[in-house]
């Protein structure tokens, strides 16, 4: 019976706009010292650049039930250890 080996490359990576490092998504959700970050905050594992993704405005709901979500903006935050 053969067993599949997991891929060596992660399926989902993010490239930092500041240091240009490419890291797995899960690494962006952790701090180097204290562990997990809040769910809306991400931090680059390479340069520790930290940001949150926040909603700008309200969702638009039409009479037929169609919903257009609000725009998202990226807000720089202080790094978390």
Image (cartoon, helix red, strand yellow):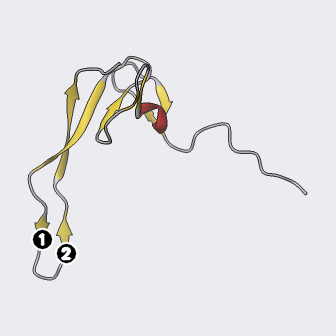
Quarter assignment of residue 41: top left
Residue at 12% x, 71% y is 61
Give the structural element (helix, strand or loop) at label 2: loop
Query: Seen in the image, is 22 located left or right of residue 42?
Result: right
Quickly name the residue at label 1.
61
Whether pointer 2 and pointer 1 mark residues with C-beta atoms closer than 8 Å, the reply is: yes
Rendered location of residue 60, percent (x, y): 11, 65
In the picture, the quarter occupied by the N terminus is bottom right
Quickly name the residue at label 2.
66
Query: Seen in the image, is 14 located left or right of residue 80?
Result: right
In the picture, the quarter occupied by the C terminus is top left
Give the farthest residue toward the front. 34
Residue at 31% x, 21% y is 80
Query: Seen in the image, is 69 located left or right of residue 24?
Result: left
Give the structural element (helix, strand or loop) at label 1: strand
* Measured Cα–Cα span from mark 2 to mark 1: 6 Å
Please tell me which residue lies in front, 52 or 64: 52
Rendered location of residue 68, percent (x, y): 18, 65
Q: Dot 1, how many residues are within 10 Å of its Cα: few (below 14), some (14-19), or many (20+)?
A: few
Q: Closer to the N terminus: mark 2 or mark 1?
A: 1
Please tell me which residue lies in front, 57 or 41: 41
Count up the numbered dots. Answer: 2
Rendered location of residue 77, percent (x, y): 22, 26
Residue 46, placed above or below residue 67: above
Residue at 70% x, 45% y is 6
Residue 49, placed above or below residue 1: above
Residue at 8% x, 52% y is 57
Q: Dot 2, how many residues are within 10 Å of its Cα: few (below 14), some (14-19), or many (20+)?
A: few
Please tell me which residue lies in front, 29 or 24: 29
């Amino acid at each position: 019976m053969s067993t599949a080996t997991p891929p060596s490359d992660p399926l989902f990576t993010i490239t930092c706009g500041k240091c240009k490092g490419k890291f797995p998504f899960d690494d962006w959700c952790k701090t180097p010292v204290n562990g997990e970050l809040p769910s809306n905050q991400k931090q680059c594992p390479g340069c520790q650049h930290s940001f949150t993704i926040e909603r700008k405005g309200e969702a638009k709901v039409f009479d037929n039930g169609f919903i257009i979500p609000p725009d998202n903006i990226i807000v720089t935050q202080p790094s978390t250890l």
